[in-house]
Amino acid sequence: MALGLTVTAMGAMALAAAAALLAPGNAHAQAAPSTAGWPTKPVRIVVPFAPGGTTDILARAMAPELSRAFGQQFIVDNRAGAGGNVGAEVVAKSPADGYTLLMGTVGTHGINRALYAKLPYDPIKDFAPITLVAAVPNVMVMNPDKAKALGVTNVQDFIKAAKANPGKLNMASSGNGTSIHLAGELFKSMTGTYMLHLPYRGSGPALMDMVAGNADVMFDNLPSSMAQIKAGKLVALAVTSSQRSTALPDVPTVEQAGGPALKGYEASSWFGLLAPAGTPADIVNRIQQETAKALASPAVKERLMAQGAIPGGNTPAEFARHIDSEHQKWAGVVKASGAKVD
């Protein structure tokens, strides 16, 4: 009898303890374990384009800085395809634990929602913005031999050549719907020219064909083209920003070089870190803070600006507002250009 009473009492105590754990005041503590020890293993930065492009360059510039700051490896993982959608989907569907990040772009988070009939992710609902890493102008480049053969030394020469050879010139890009693609589409629509679009799986492969003479023109992100421009393997006709780039001060803007038809032309790109939606806010804030520190350091800042990039480092809230405003802007450009991807 005494034994039976003891067991009953123990059972009651266990039930009371379980009830206490399930009480509203304790539910959050059970559902949200501490993230103070993060990271305890390597962190992956997914780049949704092939190696060699600006997205890849920026991710590889930030990875060692974050590795030093957190004492764990930040590893770049290239997942190219569908204008950045393949890599963005990988991150959107990854656990929200801080171990998978995306180097997002104006394409994945500003353009694609308007360009693609159906996306495998929601650029707003599926991500937690961390910070803008850099903004860059695009640059209109040609293969020097191609330019010489067409008699092109400036933007107006190119417009004349394109109009004299409708459909015979081609335009390389890093993929359908990327900022590089749309910068060219905007140029075409404003000048009334037609060029065949050649989409690649990133700037790297596209630049290889440009240097080889297999493509005629490209509106590439400036950092990925800079080395080829300096080496004389590509010639820069103009930058696509509203002002000249300090990295190429002698190169005019498209608006300056293109005449009345290109008045108001502007098509810059940006790149930033994002995490899957639901990633703990303290992890997001810690990554933002360390990224901002790195971007403000003289060594990193000088390296990025030498390639034509303007370092970022804004807060998650500021970056979220930037993404929203960029979608509104590019939705209009996509509609005006008539570009659409099924």
Image (cartoon, rainbow, N blue to C red):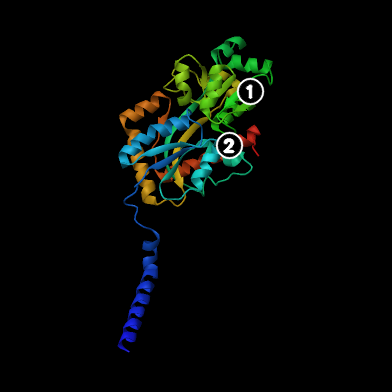
In the picture, measured across the screen, residue 232 lies left or right of residue 156, that is left
What percent of the width, then of the height, locates residue 264? 56, 27
Q: Amino acid at mark 1?
A: Thr
Q: Residue 72: give x, y in percent of width and height.
A: 33, 41
Circle 2 or circle 1, nearest the eye? 2
The answer to whether 244 is drawn above or below residue 295 in the figure is: above
Looking at the image, is 335 positioned above or below residue 246? below
Q: Is residue 226 above or below residue 106?
A: above
Q: Position of residue 128 (x, y in %)?
A: 45, 47
Of the 4 image quadrants, the one containing the C terminus is: top right
Q: In screen coordinates, is 167 left or right of 10?
A: right
Residue 262 appears in which quarter of the rendering? Answer: top right
Q: Which mark is residue 82?
A: 2
Residue at figure coordinates x 59%, y 39% from the top left: 331
Q: Which mark is residue 88?
A: none
Q: Count of labels shown?
A: 2
| Circle 1 SS class | helix
Q: Residues within 10 Å of mark 2 (few under 14, many from 20)?
A: many
Q: Is residue 272 left or right of residue 341?
A: left
Mark closer to the chain start, 2 or 1: 2
Q: Quadrant of the N terminus?
A: bottom left
Query: In this orientation, which residue lies closer to the viewer: 242 or 139?
Result: 139
Q: Return the residue found at the far bottom.
A: 1
Q: Are marks 2 and 1 in contact (CB under 8 Å)?
A: no
76 relative to 166 in the view: left or right: left
Report whether residue 188 is seen.
yes
Amino acid type at image mark 2: Ala
Where is residue 208 drawn, in percent x and y? 53, 22
Judging from the image, what secondary structure is the residue with disc 2 in?
Answer: helix
Tell me the quarter of the picture where residue 330 sits. top right
Q: Which residue is mark 1?
A: 191
Identified at 57% across, 39% down, the residue is: 112
